Image (spheres, rainbow, N blue to C red):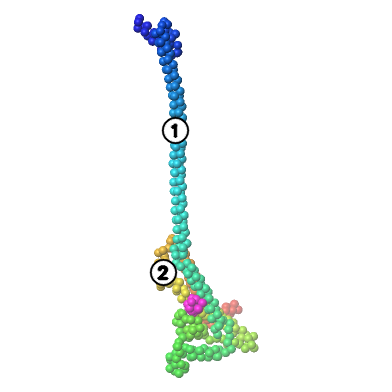
Amino acid sequence: MKAQKKIIAAAVLSTTLGSGVAYAALYGFGPAETWTIQQIAAQTAEVSGNIAAFGTAFSTQMQTKFEQIISSVAVATKQEALSANIVSDGTRQAAEQLVNAVRAQRQSDQVATAYLNYNPATGQGYDPCGTNAKNKTMDIAFESAAVQAKTTVGMADVAPGRLVNSTAQAMQARRDTHRSKFCTAAEASAGLCSASQLPGGDTNAALLFDAAPAGSLQTEARYAYIQHVLGAPDQKLEKSAGGTPAGEAFMVVKNRKDALLSVPAYSLAMIDAANTQSAQFGGKSPNEVLKLRVNQYFGGKEAEQWSGSMARQTQRGLLVEAAKMAGLEVWIHHKQYEQNQRLEANLAALLLASADKLSGPLEAQYQKVLADTDNVTVK
């Protein structure tokens, strides 16, 4: 029972302290109770003040800590975002630098490739400017040789369509030229002429194939040789004989003869022109110019330089050089084609000339067969 009373008293005291009116639960109004009440009120006020101060301080501390936490979270969030941005920017910048490096490398490779492909020493074949100039010079040389050959044929006393005043005088002029410039040792020993620097030059076909300067004794000998081969010139007719049947027959034969002789005349003149040296081509003949072009690939000092240049060429340079060589080959084939045409024309002229020997017997046989046919028809 006493224990129950103590518990009840403690509960009442606790309730009284919590409400601030503890004295209302006490019984008795003596000095001890008054002091006790005062002490309780004082303790209650102190405890209430402490609780209020603690609450205020705690609230303030909580608000401060909360603000600090919020600020820390904001700072951490911002740092995290900033860190992510830095990482992202760094990654982007690294990617940009890689792209720039790749672009720079490609540009460098393109520049290097373009330099190697289009540099005259590595991408244009051997000596592009010089080769082009030499090829043009060679082509012009042979074109001029054809023009010179036509001129040579036209100047001869046996030129197609030409008639001389006197065949005997023309042959005498040839003989005088021979004895004054091309007297042989046998003729000199016979007292016909004096020894010359080029004995028998006007009858030596080998001189046609040797290079000689224009206007030299060798070229004069070649010109005289061509005239000797073509034969004696034809003497012109008197005006009164031109309209006669004999005169007309003569001109028909003359035209046929000139047509046949014009083929070998032009061929011989072409050989002469192709081996005549000219200052226009650096003192070289067309055949010598051709030889220099061919020697670039197959002999001479230029061949060594060409071989060394090929070792430095890029693939494009080798293809360019191959195209140049193919072009030169086509050009040579064209010149060979023209030469073969002259050869065929000479063979045709030779065949026709040889057939003249058979024309008489064949004509006689034809007339005989024709007459026999007429006799059979009459019977």
Residue 79, quarter of the rendered image: top left
Q: Nearer the viewer, mark 2 or mark 1?
A: 1
Residue 298, quarter of the rendered image: bottom left
| Residue 309, position as x, y percentages in the image | 42, 66
Q: Residue furthest top?
A: 1
In this orientation, which residue lies closer to the viewer: 44 or 345? Answer: 44
Residue at figure coordinates x 37%, y 9% from the top left = 7
Residue at figure coordinates x 46%, y 68% from the top left = 127
| Residue 91, position as x, y percentages in the image | 44, 43
Amino acid type, residue under disc 1 in the picture: Ser
Magenta highlight range: 274-286
Residue 72: assigned label: 1
In this orientation, which residue lies closer to the viewer: 295 or 307? Answer: 307
- In the picture of the structure, the residue carrying the numbered disc 2 is 305
Amino acid type, residue under disc 2 in the picture: Gln
Q: Considering the image in quadrants, where does the C terminus appear?
A: bottom right
How many residues crowd around disc 1 within 10 Å: few (fewer than 14), some, or many (20 or more)? few
Residue 163, quarter of the rendered image: bottom right
2 or 1: tag closer to the N-terminus:
1
Mark 1 element type: helix
Whether residue 349 is visible to the viewer of this picture, yes or no, is no
Mark 2 element type: helix
280 is within the stretch colored magenta:
yes
Residue at figure coordinates x 51%, y 83% from the top left = 215
112 is within the stretch colored magenta:
no
In this orientation, which residue lies closer to the viewer: 88 or 273? Answer: 88
